[in-house]
Amino acid sequence: MMGQTTNRRDFLQSLIYGPTALLTLGAFNTVRTSAAAIGPNDKIKVTKVETFVLRNSWVFVKLSTDAGITGWGEMLKDDAKACAAGALEVADYLVGKDPRRVTHHWQAIHRGAFYRGGPIKTAISSGIDQALWDITGKCYGVPVHRLMGGPTRDRVRVYGKVDSRTGVNAMKVSPRGSRTPFKHAEGLKMIDEVTERFAAIRERYGRGVDIGIDFHGAVQPTTAASLVKALEPYHPWFYEEIVQALNVDVMAEIARKTHIPIATGERIFTKWGFREIIEKRAATILQPDICYAGGITELKIIAGMAEAYYTPIAPHNPQGPCSLAASLQIAASVPNFLVQERGDNEYSDLLAKPLPPMKDGYRPILTDPGLGISIDEEKLMAQVGEPSEYRTRYDKDDGSVVDW
C-alpha cells in the first residue's frame, strides 16, 4: 500500500513538473559533472576581494575562494577609483560566506546600508554580482545562462563596426554637424547640418544597415524635439538618450512626437529606476548597463519587467570583457533581447582564450563555465594605472558648462 502511494505521488509530480522533473529537481544537489570545479554539496567560501583600475578607466573586481575558484566582474568606468575602493569595503561582509547565494548577497549589499542605491554603490554591487555568478557557474561546471533556465537562443546579434567579414550590419552615430548640437535651442542651420550628415550616412550604407543615433543626453529638449522630426525621413534605427534620463516626463513627451523607437538606460540603475521609464513609455528599447544597473541579477529582473510591456533590451557596453560576457549571459537567458552593443569587440589584450568568432553579425552564446571567459591576469596587470579622466566640457562661445 505504501509503495502504491509513493508511486502515485511520483506519478503526479511527473505530471506537474514534466517527465524529467524527478531528475532535474535534484540535479545540482546530487550530480557532479566533469566540468564542475567542485561537487555541488562541497563547501566553499570567499577569501579575498581585489580590485584593479586600468589606465583606460575600466574597473575590475576579483573574488577568490578557498576552493581555488576565482570570479571576475566589472564596475562603472566613471568614478573608477571610488568604485574600486568601495568594492574593497564589501569584503567586510562577503569574506567567509558561500559565494553561491548570489541573490541573497545582492540583497544584503544593497539593503544592508542606511543609504541605498546611487550610481557608485550600485556599480559596486554590479561588479561583485558578476563575480559571484562567475564563481557559481564554475562550481557547477555550466555557463551562467544555464542556471537561469537558458538558453533562449543560439547566437546573439551585435552592433558596432559595420564589417563584411564579420557580417555586422548595425551601428550607431552621434548627431553632428559642424559641432555637436548642445545649445538649448539650436537654429535651423544646425538642424540642417545634422540632418544632412545623417542623410549622407544613410545613403552610404543603404537600407541593409541599421543605424541608430545616440544623442548621449547632451542635446537639450527643445533641440531634441526638432531633431527627432527632421531625421525621421532617413529611418534611424532608434534615437538613444534623446535627453538626460533625470526627468522621465520630458523624455516621454518627446517620445510621443515621433514614431522612431526611443532607447535609453545606460545611466539608469536598478529595477526601481527602470520602472518609471517603462510605465510612462518614455523608451521602447531599454539599454541597462550590467556594470552599473545592478549586475546579472538585476538585469534579469529588468528584462522581465520590460517583457510585460513588450519592450526589448539592448545592453549598454562601452567597457571590457566581463561587461560583454555578463551581458551575453543575459542575452542567452531572456526572450526579449534585441541586440548587444559592441558585441564585436574581441578583447584579445585581456583574455587568455579568444571569444567564439562572429558570423553574419552574430556572436555565438558563451558556453564555458561561469561568465564564459578567462581573464589573463598578466595582460590585465600590464594595463593597471592611473585612470583617464572625464574632463568638463564648455561652450566655446560663452564658456558655460555643457553636458558631457
Image (cartoon, rainbow, N blue to C red):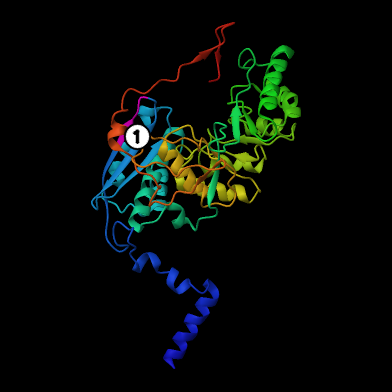
Q: Residue furthest bottom?
A: 1
Task: Decide which of 361, 63 is in the foreground and name it.
Answer: 361
The overriding secondary structure of the stretch rendered in magenta is: strand
Q: Residues within 10 Å of mark 1 (few under 14, many from 20)?
A: some
Magenta-span inclusion, residue 360: no
What quarter of the picture does the N terminus occupy?
bottom left
User: How far across and how far down the image is residue 220, in percent?
Assistant: 64, 21
Res. 314 image quadrant: top right
Residue of label 1: 86
Image position of 129 (left or right of 243) = left
Q: Is residue 248 left or right of residue 69?
A: right
Q: Foreground: 93 or 365? A: 365
- Magenta-tinted stretch: 51-55
Relative to residue 313, is residue 198 drawn left or right? right
> Would you say residue 239 is visible in this rendering?
no
Residue at image coords 37%, 48%: 134
Q: Amino acid at mark 1?
A: Gly
Residue 266 percent across, percent down from the top left: 53, 34
Farthest top residue in view: 397
Is residue 342 placed above or below 275 in the rendered structure?
A: above
Residue at image coords 48%, 43%: 327
**Vertical side of 222 occupied by 397: above or below:** above
**Residue 360 at what x, y percent from top left?**
57, 42
Frontmost residue, 47 versus 340 = 340
All told, the count of numbered labels is 1
Task: Write down the quadrant of residue 40 in the picture.
Answer: bottom left
Residue closer to the observer: 204 or 269: 204
